[in-house]
Image (tube, helix red, strand yellow):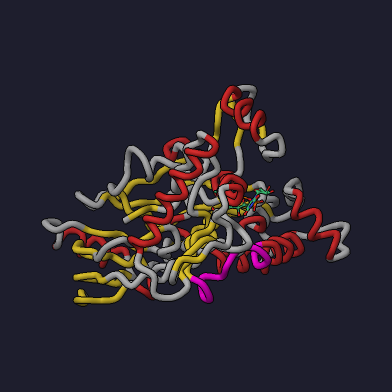
């Protein structure tokens, strides 16, 4: 059923009070196909967990809230299992479900806001693991002709916070469910990220289980990332820039202390959080919005900020970082 003039404040983790002229909560595949077919003469706006977007204006299009639910086992062998989760399942609840049944692979991705359906779109990642590492396939529906398509790993063209769904196929498909391949035993633990080791040591854990890793990740995230329930935000607002060896040399000549991760001999990743902090923005508050005081990559809404104000702040940060370091930082969040 289509409702009119709905506030989207509760549907985006930034907590921006934008208005949807028309809104439809979709709970079955059949309803989704029906509404796509019946309303195909008007533009759609696909809304999932609302955790990776900044609404800078009201939405004229028909907002489709993808609320498909369900988790099922597709296939199981002695050592591994393929789980199908519908697009509207909450990502972190799914991670906790996996940990309860001792299915390994997603524990490092604990507490990432958002839903299952959007996880492949930006290839969510944290603490040394990305969605692509457990991805088997996903099901999607074509917005224009309602045909079904299964996307296998190679079809998705995953990259760092990237996939085909953000590029060539942007706004063409709605992901309806995702199949993930997880381990049932001999879990491959990812402990390389420094903060995880430190956290496990603090907890006095020498032989961690996937549950311990999840707990450690939750503790780390809670210590530096704001909970959208308390302070509106969309996680990292920017991507960490990847720069050339020459650019990195130039950076080091002025800032020898700059942290970095080598990706290849010619590509170096620099934490955008460090650049933004060094540019003086960490913890800066402007009226009802600002830069988080524990993680400069995160822009926050303290209450009733407008999306446009936050976007202007993002542009100011980009300009300042470019001026000081001659490095371009791109947004990770979708600007609407
Ligand atoms: N740093 C600072 N100041 C800051 C923040 C970071 O100097 O305010 C520097 C520190 O040197 C730190 C380094 O940046 O050692 C890396 O920081 P952190 O480990 O917090 O990771 P990040 O690169 O800032 C990325 C992801 C996060 C993910 C963490 C952990 C991106 C854009 N962000 O952040 O993802 O949780 O690594 O894997 O890649 C998200 O995508 O929404 C997100 C939160």
Q: How many numbered marks have been drawn onto this rendered protein structure?
A: 0
Q: Is residue 150 above or below residue 112?
A: above
Residue at 66% across, 46% down: 128
Nearest the eye: 197 or 304: 304
Magenta highlight on residue 229: yes
Whether the magenta-drawn stretch holds residue 258 is answered as no
Residue 121: image location, x then y, percent: 43, 49
List x then y, in percent, for residue 32. Answer: 27, 63
Residue sitting at x 47%, y 60% = 116
Per the rendered image, the range of residues in magenta is: 221-231
Q: Is residue 210 left or right of residue 242?
A: right
- Residue 324 or residue 123, whichever sits in front: 324
Q: Which quarter of the image is occupied by the C terminus?
A: bottom left
Figure check: 88 above or below 154: below
Residue 297 placement (x, y as % from top left): 55, 54
Task: List x then y, in percent, for residue 314.
Answer: 43, 53
**Residue 322 in view in this figure:** yes
């Amino acid at each position: 059923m289509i409702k009119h003039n709905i506030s989207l404040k509760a549907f985006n983790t930034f907590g921006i009070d934008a208005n949807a002229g028309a809104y439809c909560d979709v709970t079955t595949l059949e309803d989704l196909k029906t509404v796509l077919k019946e309303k195909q003469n008007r533009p759609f706006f696909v809304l999932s967990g609302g955790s990776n977007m900044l609404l800078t204006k009201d939405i004229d299009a028909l907002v489709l809230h993808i609320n498909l639910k369900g988790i099922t086992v597709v296939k199981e062998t002695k050592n591994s299992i393929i789980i199908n989760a519908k697009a509207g399942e909450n990502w972190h609840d799914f991670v906790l479900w996996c940990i309860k049944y001792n299915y390994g692979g997603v524990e490092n991705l604990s507490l990432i806001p958002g839903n299952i359906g959007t996880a492949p779109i930006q290839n969510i990642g944290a603490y040394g693991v990305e969605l692509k590492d457990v991805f088997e396939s996903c099901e999607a529906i074509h917005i224009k002709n309602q045909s079904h398509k299964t996307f296998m790993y190679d079809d998705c063209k995953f990259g760092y916070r990237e996939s085909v769904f953000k590029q060539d196929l942007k706004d063409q498909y709605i992901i309806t469910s995702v199949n993930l391949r997880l381990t049932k035993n001999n879990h491959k633990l990812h402990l390389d990220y420094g903060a995880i080791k430190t956290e496990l040591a603090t907890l006095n854990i020498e032989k961690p289980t996937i549950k311990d890793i999840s707990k450690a990740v939750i503790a780390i995230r809670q210590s530096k990332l704001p909970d959208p329930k308390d302070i509106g935000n969309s996680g990292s607002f920017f991507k960490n820039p990847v720069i050339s060896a020459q650019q990195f040399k130039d950076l080091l000549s002025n800032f020898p202390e700059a942290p970095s991760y080598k990706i290849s001999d010619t590509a170096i990743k620099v934490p955008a959080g460090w650049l933004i902090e060094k540019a003086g923005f960490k913890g800066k508050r402007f009226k009802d919005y600002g830069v988080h005081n524990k993680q400069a990559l995160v822009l926050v809404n303290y209450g009733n900020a407008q999306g446009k104000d936050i976007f202007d702040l993002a542009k100011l940060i980009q300009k300042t970082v470019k001026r000081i370091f001659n490095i371009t930082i791109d947004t990770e969040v979708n600007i609407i």
